[in-house]
Image: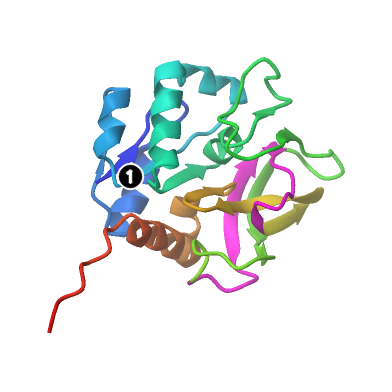
Amino acid sequence: MIALVDYGAGNLTSVRKGLNAAGASIFTPATPGDLASARGIIIPGVGHFGSTRAIDEAWRQAILDAAGTGTPLLGICLGLQFLFEGSTEAPDVRGLGILRGHCALLPPTQKVPHVGWNELRIVQRSRLLADVPDGSQVYFTHSYAAPVTDACVAETAYTTRFAAVVERGNVFGVQFHPEKSGDAGLRILQTFVRLTSPVPLATKC
């Protein structure tokens, strides 16, 4: 089953609906130790980076331990930003630090927050985006964004270029909301569900 981490940063109802539509079996872990049995972990979230303070050291370590042993990890929106070292939105709050760099406010050359549909430009081969065509439209709502680093596999331009999808090994993140992004978002969630499935053992002839 996939663990959907609830740390109070937003309503999880739409994420649960999206995962159910993608065929996922999900549970909300009550303690950090519950993550040890998860086949995948999702960190969702909306709003201020300071909300991630609720993910205390025990939860942080459990997430890092699981990711370190190969459990697929997906961050959605604020969850993607939490994969990085931190954000200028809350400079005193540490991110997980799995990915290098800090998130920052979008330049105000257009209306911020960025709310609405925008194009994904795929810039590297990606397992998470295997079934998503380049140029797909997805739904964003955010004011801060992650930098374009070597972990960026798809970017979007709105006031500036920013990382829309990041990927490194078994760690993935999307700045947009796949559960609100129609067919493209559903395909991404379905792919993540497949990545959490155990590889079937080969049968002997």
Relative placement, left or right, of 113 versus 178 is: right
Please tell me which residue is depicted at 65% across the width and 65% down the height of the picture: 124
The residue lying furthest to the left in this view is 205
Please tell me which residue is depicted at 52% across the width and 23% down the height of the picture: 52
Figure quadrant of the C terminus: bottom left
Near-viewer residue (204 or 146): 204
Please tell me which residue is depicted at 33% across the width and 44% down the height of the picture: 16
Near-viewer residue (145 or 95): 95
Asked where in the image residue 21 lies, by quadrant, the reply is bottom left
Residue 199 position (above or below residue 51): below
Q: Position of residue 42 (x, y in %)?
A: 41, 41
First to last magenta residue range: 131-153
Residue 155 position (above or below residue 113): below
Q: Position of residue 183 (x, y in %)?
A: 45, 66
Q: Secondary structure at mark 1?
A: helix
Near-viewer residue (143 or 58): 58
Q: Give yes or no for residue 167 being in the magenta stretch.
A: no
Relative placement, left or right, of 51 versus 27 is: right
Q: Position of residue 38 (x, y in %)?
A: 28, 41
User: Can the viewer see residue 104?
Assistant: yes
The residue tagged 1 is: 16
The residue lying furthest to the bottom in this view is 205
Relative placement, left or right, of 59 versus 205 is: right
